[in-house]
Amino acid sequence: QVQLVESGGGLVQAGGSLRLSCTASGTIFSIRAMGWYRQASGKQRELVAFITSTGSTNYVDSVKGRFTISRDNAKNTVYLQMNSLKPEDTAVYYCNQDIVPAGGRAYMEYWGQGTQVTVSS
C-alpha cells in the first residue's frame, strides 16, 4: 500500500526558512506529477507548487521567488524549500503525488498527512 509521509514543518520567525519533504513508500511502479498544497485556517486548500516528471515547475504567484520545489526520483521524494517566510504562509501543508502502484494500471492521487507551518511576525 502506498503512503506519503511528510516532514519538516514547524515554527519559524518571519524571514526565516523551512524545508518540507514528502516521501512515498510502498511498491510503486511510476510517479508522475508531485505537488504541495496548503490550507490556512478558515480558507480553502490551494496549490502552492508542482513539478512534473520532466522537472517543469509552476508556483502560485504569492510564493514565486521565495519557494522552490524539487524532486528526487530515486527516493520517491518531493521537497519544498521555503525562504523569506511571511506570516501569511502559515498553514497546514500537504504533499500530493500521482502514482501508479505496482500491479496498477492507472495513476492515482495520494496525499500526505499534512504538516503545520507557522510563521510568527
Image: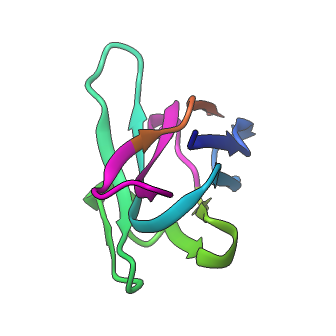
- Give how far across and how far down residue 60 sits, in percent: 28, 58
Relative vertical location of residue 58 with respect to residue 17 in this rendering, above or below: below
Relative vertical location of residue 83 with respect to residue 10 in this rendering, above or below: below
- Give how far across and how far down residue 102 sits, in percent: 50, 58
- Give how far across and how far down residue 15 sits, in percent: 64, 53
Q: Quadrant of the C terminus?
A: top right
In the image, taking residue 113 as reference, residue 57 lies left or right, namely left
Give the residue at the far front of this rendering.
103
* Residue 46 visible in the picture: yes
User: In this picture, which residue range is highlighted in magenta?
Assistant: 85-109
- The quarter of the picture where residue 77 lies is bottom right
In the image, taking residue 48 as reference, residue 85 lies left or right, namely right
Relative vertical location of residue 56 with respect to residue 80 in this rendering, above or below: below
What residue sits 43% from the left and 72% below the top? 65
What residue sits 39% from the left and 78% below the top? 53
- The quarter of the picture where residue 42 lies is top left
What residue sits 73% from the left and 40% below the top? 12
- Nearest the eye: 38 or 54: 54
What residue sits 27% from the left and 60% below the top? 61
